[in-house]
Amino acid sequence: MRSSGSVVAIIPARAGSKGIPGKNLRTVGGRSLVRRAVDAARAAGTIDAVVVSTDGDAIAAEAADAGATVVRRPTELAGDEASSESGLLHALDVLGTDGTAPEVVVFLQATSPFVDPADLDRAVDRVRSGAADVVFAATPSHAFLWRAAADGSAVAVNHDAATRPRRQDREPEYRETGAFTVFRADAFRQHRHRFHGRVEFVVVDPVLAVDVDDLADLAHAEALAARAHADALATH
């Protein structure tokens, strides 16, 4: 790991999960979620090193086998109430103790199994060039959103309920996928939050923008991986 000007991917991967026990070690397309995240980061040309922050022995072993450096997260930062920011800050503190603090951080979520390394490179390039302070993954949406009022009635959020323009006549909005966020380490330390300064997004494939939170998401991801494998075989 380079000591200056480096780009480091940090993948928080707690051992505990209420939605799916052992979630980060569940497999999609024959690879665990944590391994898929490490593989995506290592395949990106702009990323110099990959770090997995975890409190779990099995996750640590899997991450190391995949080629990542492991940072052992303390128990107080591994509970359900612990924020992603706290885990990232701890990992940066650990990296800084040996003089290898990165310039740019790629916060990569293990529960997003289909991250394209090219999307990571695009985001890193925007931050390294100074064009943006933060770049995150997003997909376009033309959805009409509603919320429930206190009395139970429906209230239009992002549109005029009396006007129903065609999809092609509406400017898209963009949904944050959570797959990755890229930012400068020093600015993150200053603000202690991943969104600060000039924020941009990289548009990622909406079909593959899966976030594995429950068993239905896992089954959906597995189906997508199987379809991609079948398509790859068909082209050979």
Image (tube, grey):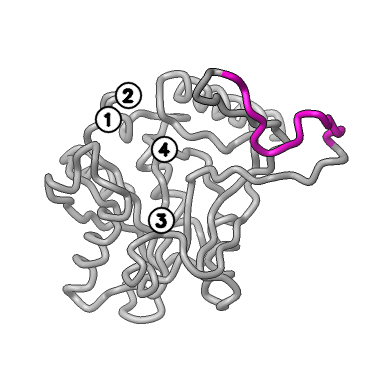
Percent of width and height locating residue 210: 53, 34
Q: Amino acid at mark 2?
A: Ile
Q: Amino acid at mark 4?
A: Thr
Residue 167, placed above or below residue 60 = above
Which element carries disc 1, helix, strand or loop?
Answer: loop
Residue 215, placed above or below residue 169 = above
Residue 218, placed above or below residue 47 = above
Query: Separation of disc 1 and disc 4 at Cα?
Result: 11 Å
Q: Amino acid at mark 1?
A: Ser
Which residue is the site of mark 2?
20
Percent of width and height locating residue 95: 23, 68
Q: Which residues are magenta?
A: 153-167
Residue 76, placed above or below residue 118 = above
Query: Separation of disc 2 and disc 4 at Cα?
Result: 11 Å
Circles 2, 1 touching at the beta carbon (< 8 Å): yes
Which element carries disc 2, helix, strand or loop?
Answer: loop
Q: Is residue 227 magenta?
A: no
Q: Which mark is residue 142?
A: none
Q: Is residue 156 magenta?
A: yes
Which element carries disc 3, helix, strand or loop?
Answer: strand
Which element carries disc 4, helix, strand or loop?
Answer: loop
Q: Residue at x 13, y 50 (%)?
A: 74
Which residue is the site of mark 1?
17
Circle nearer the N terminus (2, 4): 2
Spot the residue most to the left.
Answer: 75
Q: Quadrant of the N terminus?
A: bottom left
Q: Which mark is residue 111?
A: 4
Which residue is the site of mark 3?
107
Circles 3, 4 touching at the beta carbon (< 8 Å): no
Circle nearer the N terminus (3, 2): 2
